[in-house]
Image (spheres, grey):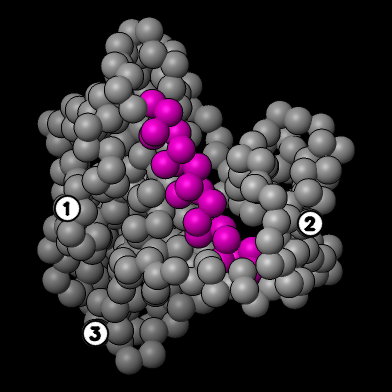
Amino acid sequence: MCQPSHDRRNPEFAMTPINEIDDRLGRAASSAPVERPSRPPLDLNLLVVLDALLAHRHVSRAADALGVGQPAASAALKRLRRHYGDVLLERSGNSYVLTPFATELATRVGAALSEVRRVADAGIGFEASSAQRTFELVVSDAAASVLLPPLLERMRTEAPGVSLSVSQHGRTGEDLRSVLRRHDGVVLPHELAGVTRAVPLFEDRLLCVADPQLGPASAALTTDDAAGRPWVLVLPAASSQPIGLGQLLSMVTEPRVTLVLDHFASVPSALRGTPHLAIVPERLVTTHPAFEGLRPLSCPWPTPPFRMAMHWDPALEHDAGHQWFRDTMAAAAATVRGA
């Protein structure tokens, strides 16, 4: 039921701070290399292709995501280049990168498509047992390992035609408001999201973990341990710094951070058989099989709980399907809290 999602890019856990979205698109367009005083309207079907091209930055992968042939995607890219007077994708070594104009465009096209879909679905009721809909969720692998099992089980029994598309981040440089407009929900600590609509999920806190044989002998990590041992930290995409780095710096002036990962899944393999320490959410350690056998340690700094929540765009307030999704997320989280 869970489908892979193409890359749509949390101090600690934070995504890029919420900023007011200004009208930079017009300024970027006016600076494009080809003057275009007038042009015919853009075929709105091309926006779907444009969104995939900007997300995947590769014609073949975009075509695969859309379920069309590469020639069709290439032809659409040519039409988009003529329309905007910008190449949009340009080669850099063995890969492609977005032009400055395309980078600006990327923050708007997904939001525009979401608005079009919401307009199309306006006034339509939602019957879970017969509905055909895909909900798009941004959630870290740590929170996903806790939430997805009970969520998918509820979806399977209540709404067999409903699917879930999960990604771990928004696009590089996106603020939270833009990410919210392109997705049905973003899971991150409530305290760091600012004023948004949110469904409370569960509380968690940070733990230190280590290999049971090569880690510290005591279950309580000391300041000397923190200063003398190497660290593995996790820097989620679009975060300002690795998770736990602020607390670590409050105890150690120059910690030995020898490995930084962009997800939690590889932390166990980086710890086993090494003297490294890592900082991870407690629920991940207690629920994810990969962390079995690693030793949890109390950190030498305060670790107050943080409240995870699913944040959503206020424009979805009266969407019947989204109301069902919010209620289902809340019910799944209640299962987690009761575990």
Residue farthest along the right direction in this orientation = 71
Image coordinates for residue 191, horizontal then vertical, percent: 17, 61
Above-or-below relation of 135 to 25:
above
Q: Is residue 101 visible?
A: yes
Residue farthest along the bottom direction in this orientation = 253
From the image, tell me which residue sits under label 3. Answer: 250
Amino acid type of the residue tagged 1 in the rendering: Arg
Image coordinates for residue 117, horizontal then vertical, percent: 45, 33
Disc 3 crowd rating (10 Å Cα; few below 14, some 14-19, many 20+) is few
In the figure, is residue 258 to the left or right of 43? left
Magenta region, main secondary structure: helix
Above-or-below relation of 293 to 210:
above
Q: Secondary structure at mark 1?
A: strand
Q: Cα distance, mark 1 to mark 2? A: 48 Å
Above-or-below relation of 188 to 44:
below
Mark 1 touching mark 2, by CB under 8 A?
A: no
Q: Cα distance, mark 2 to mark 3? A: 54 Å
From the image, tell me which residue sits under label 1. Answer: 307
Q: Is residue 335 visible?
A: no
- Residue at 27% of width from left, 30% of height from top? 319
In the figure, is residue 285 to the left or right of 81? left
Q: Does residue 35 belong to the magenta stretch?
A: no
Amino acid type of the residue tagged 3 in the rendering: Ser
Image coordinates for residue 228, horizontal then vertical, percent: 38, 83
Residues drawn in magenta: 98-121
Q: Does residue 108 belong to the magenta stretch?
A: yes
Amino acid type of the residue tagged 2 in the rendering: Arg
